Image: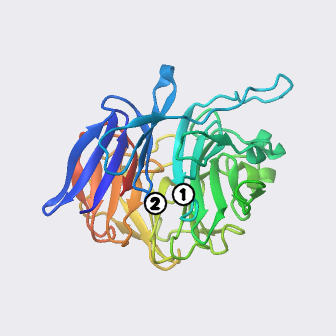
């Protein structure tokens, strides 16, 4: 039976695929903000990151076959040196994303945080280490916040062929790649361009705002990016990015992107109006899909609200199943939709959940 998890402003909800469609199941951490959830397929453990405001960030793990959550360590920044001339406070604000290491790295987890730190755990979250190799890069002084006041790491793409190759996306700090497990890093945003900075800096790799980066599981050199200023695609593991232009006036601003796991030419996006409004164009929700590597895009609307719709889809709230047929999409206003036809048709699962931060199949 297909299952999923929905991380919301007021708890974590289970989602089960029944013969008649998707149904909401049990909840955990009811009333508490869950910023991210991860199911580790290597050992069946599930991780939930909580953002408790005054009480700080918390991280919990539920082992396979268990109904009990255990609190584990959270990423912690080292003391900030008095000599450090840094406008960013060295203090965890919240965990924005979680990712499992490669199949040959049992126990390895990655965490992307605000204010822009990347952490690695080698022991299933019992302890965390800040990747000082990235944090101490001189270029970090140029990073700045997008939707938040400080930079943040939201995308962690581990290469399934080589667990030591990891690409991360930062708002606003571009894309960075390591090929040695985090010992060293280099910029990987060549080709991206930004119109929110002075023209002479538009092509600077280190100040780009990739809203989300997604890797094709079966063709890992292919990466898709929903950028603040459009859609980009890389065919060489992020060495160079090509901008794509949806035809027919289809918008290209948004936050979410999902990549087909077996077809590197197919990806889905959820466009919205930029910048101040951030609602669906014409108050009608649609998903755009390309099946030819970005040469053309089609608008998918069947089953989605086409009047008075003001739902925004966050970065981590559009996901595709392992077979590439089922999709889940969730919004900031608590609506949740499912498709079992690659996005051709959608069915509303719920319209009254709390604001949704992330959805994940497992």
How many marks the image carries: the answer is 2
- Can you say which quadrant of the picture contains the C terminus? bottom left
Q: Position of residue 184 (x, y in %)?
A: 78, 55
Look at the numbered discs 1 and 2 and tell me whether their residues touch, using CB distance below 8 Å. Answer: yes
**Secondary structure category for the residue under label 1:** loop
Q: At 81% across and 52% down in the image, what residue appears?
A: 200
119 relative position to 188: left or right: left
Q: At 67% across and 32% down in the image, what residue appears?
A: 77
152 relative position to 83: left or right: left
Query: Which residue is most to the right?
Result: 83
Front-lying residue, 157 or 110: 110
Q: Position of residue 205 (x, y in %)?
A: 75, 55
Is residue 149 something that shows in the picture? yes
Q: Position of residue 95 (x, y in %)?
A: 54, 39
- Can you say which quadrant of the picture contains the N terminus? bottom left
**Secondary structure category for the residue under label 2:** loop
Image: 5 above or below 218: above
The residue pinned by badge 1 equals 106
Q: Position of residue 22 (x, y in %)?
A: 21, 56
Mark 1 closeness class: few <14, some 14–19, many ≥20 residues within 10 Å: some
Q: CA distance from mark 1 to mark 2?
A: 7 Å
Identify the mark at residue 42; answer none if there is no mark: 2
């Amino acid at each position: 039976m297909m299952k999923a998890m929905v991380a919301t402003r007021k708890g974590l909800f289970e989602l089960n695929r029944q013969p008649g469609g998707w149904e909401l199941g049990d909840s955990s951490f009811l009333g508490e903000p869950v910023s991210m959830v991860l199911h580790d397929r290597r050992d069946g453990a599930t991780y939930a990151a909580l953002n408790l405001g005054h009480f700080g960030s918390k991280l919990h793990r539920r082992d396979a076959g268990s109904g009990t959550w255990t609190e584990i360590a959270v990423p912690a920044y080292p003391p900030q040196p008095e000599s450090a001339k840094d406008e960013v406070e060295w203090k965890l604000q919240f965990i924005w994303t979680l990712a499992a290491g490669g199949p040959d790295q049992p126990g390895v987890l990655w965490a992307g945080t605000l204010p822009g730190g990347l952490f690695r755990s080698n022991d299933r979250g019992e302890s965390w280490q800040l990747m000082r190799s990235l944090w101490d890069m001189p270029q970090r002084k140029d990073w700045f916040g997008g939707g938040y006041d400080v930079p943040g790491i939201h995308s962690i793409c581990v290469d399934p062929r080589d667990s030591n190759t990891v690409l991360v996306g930062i708002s606003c700090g571009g894309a960075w790649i390591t090929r040695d497990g985090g010992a060293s890093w280099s910029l990987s945003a060549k080709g991206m361009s930004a119109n929110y900075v002075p023209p002479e800096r538009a092509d600077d790799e280190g100040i780009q705002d990739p809203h989300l980066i997604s890797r094709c599981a079966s063709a890992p050199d292919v990466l898709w990016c929903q950028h603040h200023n459009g859609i980009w695609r890389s065919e060489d593991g992020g060495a160079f990015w090509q901008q794509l232009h949806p035809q027919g006036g289809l918008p290209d601003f948004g936050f979410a992107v999902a990549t087909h796991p077996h077809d590197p030419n197919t990806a889905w996006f959820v466009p919205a109006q930029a910048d101040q409004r951030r609602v669906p164009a014409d108050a009608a929700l649609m998903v755009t899909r390309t099946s030819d590597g970005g040469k053309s895009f089609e608008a998918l609307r069947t089953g989605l609200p086409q009047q008075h719709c003001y739902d925004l889809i966050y970065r981590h709230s559009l996901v595709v199943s392992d077979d590439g047929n089922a999709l889940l999409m969730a919004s900031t206003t608590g609506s949740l939709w499912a498709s079992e036809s690659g996005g051709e048709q959608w069915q509303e699962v719920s319209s009254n959940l709390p604001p949704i931060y992330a959805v994940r199949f497992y």
